[in-house]
Image (cartoon, helix red, strand yellow):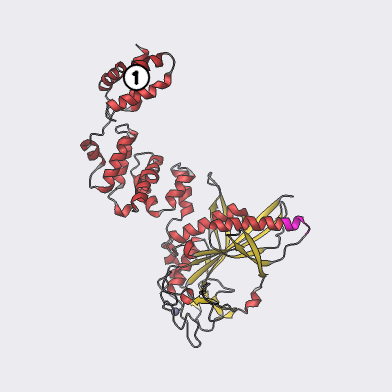
């Protein structure tokens, strides 16, 4: 039997606010253990939290970016559970009225630019917990409270994804959006984005969902792909062997490449949610909701599709340009001159310019390159005024000096010779001193023409136009 794999995701993203969600402790990663904490975030009795306004703003921003309805009036709720890294023994989160709900994101499925709409059930704000440190030299575990109270948004999707590929495309989209609207540093290695994954399977054609299994805290996207594929295979095996799937939470171990039963699934009532009595109701005025909406730039997937459609760029180029705001902004400045092929602009930005950026660990801000200079240079290549090799020399100069592309070509004598009479004289000499190659050509070994054009290029010190040289070489030998 063929099965369909159904995936729903809960993405937790740490917000890059300066301070924590309910106190003024610094929100930063990598500080000395237990140095960014105070009586509030360590849950001392009698302390009072106060909500960081920036957290609400950032979450509303994400709500708009994911096309959600924003609940102008909402509240915080207390979710009760005990864990050693949670000193209050409750987490202040949102239960029945999230800040944002009923949204969606359009993910790009393949090279053709086909999209699929994935529903976003809700986005709510909450606090992160601390971190347990397990040290072998010590008989027990230690706890670092620095992460207690770090602001999080939890983005809950509908079970709209089919298989690991769509899940990966969704995660990539969410990450790109978080970076575009600049509300999370998205550093996976620091745990800034983690996801809980819900997986179920059902026979193809069925419209009833199977029982879902949840895997908690997967902290890489490639790990998420492996976890989904493993869990789907496990469920199918259980069903094929006549068993049934039970609703449970499993722990994914990426090193071992398998998951383990953690606990049978808890329900909301196990947490005894109730409205947080220490915090006021949240009111976000409509004007503020609108103002935040206006601050949102064009989002990455829309940009990718626009590049593919308007400029006929391949999906690969569009994706690489769109994922970097500086590169896409520069690309668009070049496009505005409307003088050269968009694909050529993309090739230079993603090719030599990116290579130089990587080698020197720099970006546009560290260079002197202007869109006009790059476009002028590309135009000269397109018109065969300079060769590709010559253009590379021009690029190095215009990237780091106050000089125009044309000036470089003049000063370095890079202009290609396209004047036929000058080239004919040069070809004549080359043919005279390469008799053997000429005879080979006459005897049918026509691929020797590449060698002869190469000799001509060398004689012209790289300034000959190779296309014209080839024409002259061929016509001269044939008329001999
Ligand atoms: Zn604190």
Disc 1 target residue: 473
From the viewer's perspective, is residue 268 above or below residue 379? Answer: below
Q: Residues within 10 Å of mark 1 (few under 14, many from 20)?
A: many
Q: Is residue 22 left or right of residue 231?
A: left
Q: Residue at x 46, y 71 (%)?
A: 56
Q: Residue at x 75, y 62 (%)?
A: 244
Q: Secondary structure at mark 1?
A: helix
Residue ranking furthest to the front: 137
Q: Please, what is the dominant secondary structure of the magenta stretch? A: helix
Classify the position of ligand 1 by quadrant: top left, top right, bottom left or bottom right: bottom left
Cβ of disc 1 within 8 Å of ligand 1? no
Is residue 93 on the magenta stretch?
no
Choose between 119 and 424: the one closer to the eye: 424
Provide residue 1's location: percent of width, then percent of height.
74, 50
Is residue 241 on the magenta stretch?
yes
Q: Which residues are magenta?
A: 237-242
Provide residue 406's location: percent of width, then percent of height.
24, 39
Choose between 100 and 224: the one closer to the eye: 224
Q: Residue at x 34, y 19 (%)?
A: 473
Residue 240 visible, this angle = yes
Q: Residue at x 58, y 59 (%)?
A: 255
Provide residue 329's location: percent of width, then percent of height.
37, 51
Q: Is residue 218 left or right of residue 417?
A: right
Q: Quadrant of residue 422?
A: top left
Q: Is residue 283 left or right of residue 420?
A: right
Q: Is residue 158 left or right of residue 422?
A: right
């Amino acid at each position: 039997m063929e099965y369909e794999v159904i995936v729903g995701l809960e993405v937790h993203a740490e917000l890059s606010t300066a301070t924590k969600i309910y106190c003024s402790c610094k929100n930063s990663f990598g500080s000395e253990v237990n140095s960014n904490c105070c009586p509030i975030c360590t849950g001392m009795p009698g302390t009072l939290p106060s909500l960081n306004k920036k957290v609400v703003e950032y979450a509303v921003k994400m709500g708009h970016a994911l096309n959600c309805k924003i609940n102008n009036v909402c509240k915080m709720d207390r979710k009760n559970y005990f864990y050693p890294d949670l000193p209050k023994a409750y987490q202040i989160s949102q239960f029945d009225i999230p800040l944002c709900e009923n949204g969606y994101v359009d993910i790009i499925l393949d090279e053709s630019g086909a999209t699929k709409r994935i529903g976003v059930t809700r986005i709510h704000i909450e606090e992160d917990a601390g971190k347990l440190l397990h040290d072998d030299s010590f008989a027990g575990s230690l706890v670092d409270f620095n992460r207690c109270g770090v602001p999080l948004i939890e983005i809950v999707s509908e079970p709209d994804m089919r298989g690991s590929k769509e899940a990966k495309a969704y995660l990539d989209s969410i990450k790109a959006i978080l970076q575009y609207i600049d509300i999370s540093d998205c550093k996976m290695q620091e745990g800034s984005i983690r996801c809980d994954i819900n997986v179920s399977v059902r026979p193809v054609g069925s419209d009833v969902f199977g029982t879902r299994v949840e895997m908690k805290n997967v902290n890489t996207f490639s790990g998420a792909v492996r976890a989904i594929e493993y869990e789907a295979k496990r469920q199918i095996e259980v069903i094929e062997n006549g068993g049934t799937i039970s609703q449970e939470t499993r722990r994914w171990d990426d090193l071992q490449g398998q998951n383990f039963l953690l606990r049978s699934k808890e329900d909301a009532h196990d947490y005894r949610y109730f409205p947080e009595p220490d915090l006021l109701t949240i009111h976000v005025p409509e004007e503020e909701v609108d103002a935040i909406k206006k601050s949102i730039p064009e989002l990455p997937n829309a940009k990718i599709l626009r590049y593919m459609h308007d400029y006929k760029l391949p999906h690969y180029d569009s994706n690489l340009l769109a994922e970097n705001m500086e590169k896409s902004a520069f690309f668009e400045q070049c496009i505005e001159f409307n003088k050269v092929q968009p694909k050529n602009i993309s090739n230079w930005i993603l090719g030599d310019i990116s290579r130089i950026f990587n080698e020197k660990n720099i970006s546009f801000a560290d260079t002197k390159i202007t869109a006009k200079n790059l476009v002028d240079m590309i135009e000269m290549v397109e018109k065969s005024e300079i060769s590709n090799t010559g253009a590379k020399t021009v690029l190095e100069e215009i990237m780091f000096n106050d000089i125009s592309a044309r000036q470089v070509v003049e000063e370095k004598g890079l202009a290609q010779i396209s004047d036929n009479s000058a080239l004919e004289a040069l070809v004549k000499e080359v043919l005279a001193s390469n008799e053997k190659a000429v005879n080979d050509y006459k005897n049918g070994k026509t691929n020797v023409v590449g060698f002869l054009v190469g000799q001509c290029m060398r004689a012209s010190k790289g300034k000959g136009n190779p296309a014209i040289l080839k024409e002259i070489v061929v016509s001269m030998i044939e008329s001999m």
